[in-house]
Image (cartoon, rainbow, N blue to C red):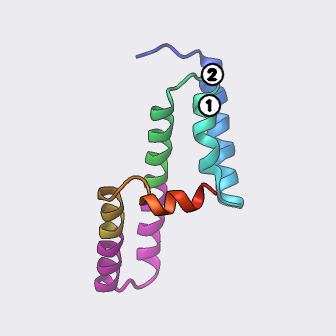
């Protein structure tokens, strides 16, 4: 495990607090976290983005659990929507990574 100075840990904690506050007030604080992890701490981009995604998953999961406790959730509809989202994201991932040739030609004009 790399040694990180205490001042850097304190700076990163303050940055995470700022990102959380921005996200709570206006949204988009998650855009701040990868930059803050990558610039001062020298964290590789893949690690910074993975950390950001993990934070987003935990936050969204917590919000979903809180919502489910406070409001009635139509489980069959939620499952259908979740499966449709999973199919859509998996289908795009399995598809081509670039548009067909004609679309590329049209966009390069």
Q: Nearer the viewer, residue 10 or 87?
A: 87
Q: Position of residue 44 (x, y in %)?
A: 49, 27
Quadrant in which the C terminus is drawn: bottom right
Residue visible at 46% across and 78% down?
70
Badge 1 crowding class, 10 Å Cα cut-off, few under 14, some 14 to 19, many 20 or more, is some
Q: Position of residue 3 (x, y in %)?
A: 49, 13
Q: Which residue is mark 2?
A: 8
Q: Which residues are magenta?
A: 58-85
Displayed quadrant of residue 5: top right
Check residue 59 for magenta coloring: yes
Q: Identify the element where label 2 is drawn.
A: helix
Residue 57 drawn above or below residue 75: above
Measured Cα–Cα span from mark 2 to mark 1? 6 Å
Q: Nearer the viewer, residue 64 or 49?
A: 49
Q: Is residue 41 left or right of residue 77?
A: right
Residue visible at 40% across and 16% down?
1
Q: Are marks 2 and 1 in contact (CB under 8 Å)?
A: yes
Q: Identify the element where label 1 is drawn.
A: helix
Q: Which residue is mark 1?
A: 12
Residue 22 drawn above or below residue 66: above
């Amino acid at each position: 495990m790399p040694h990180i100075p205490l001042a850097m840990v304190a700076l990163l904690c303050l940055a995470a607090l700022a990102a959380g506050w921005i996200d709570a007030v206006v949204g988009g604080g998650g855009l701040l976290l990868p930059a803050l992890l990558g610039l001062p701490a020298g964290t590789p981009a893949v690690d910074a983005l993975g950390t950001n995604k993990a934070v987003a998953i935990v936050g969204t999961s917590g919000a979903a659990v809180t919502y489910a406790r406070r409001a009635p959730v139509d489980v069959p509809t939620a499952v259908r929507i979740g499966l449709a989202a999973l199919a859509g994201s998996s289908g795009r991932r399995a598809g081509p990574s670039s548009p067909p040739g004609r679309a590329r030609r049209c966009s390069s004009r």
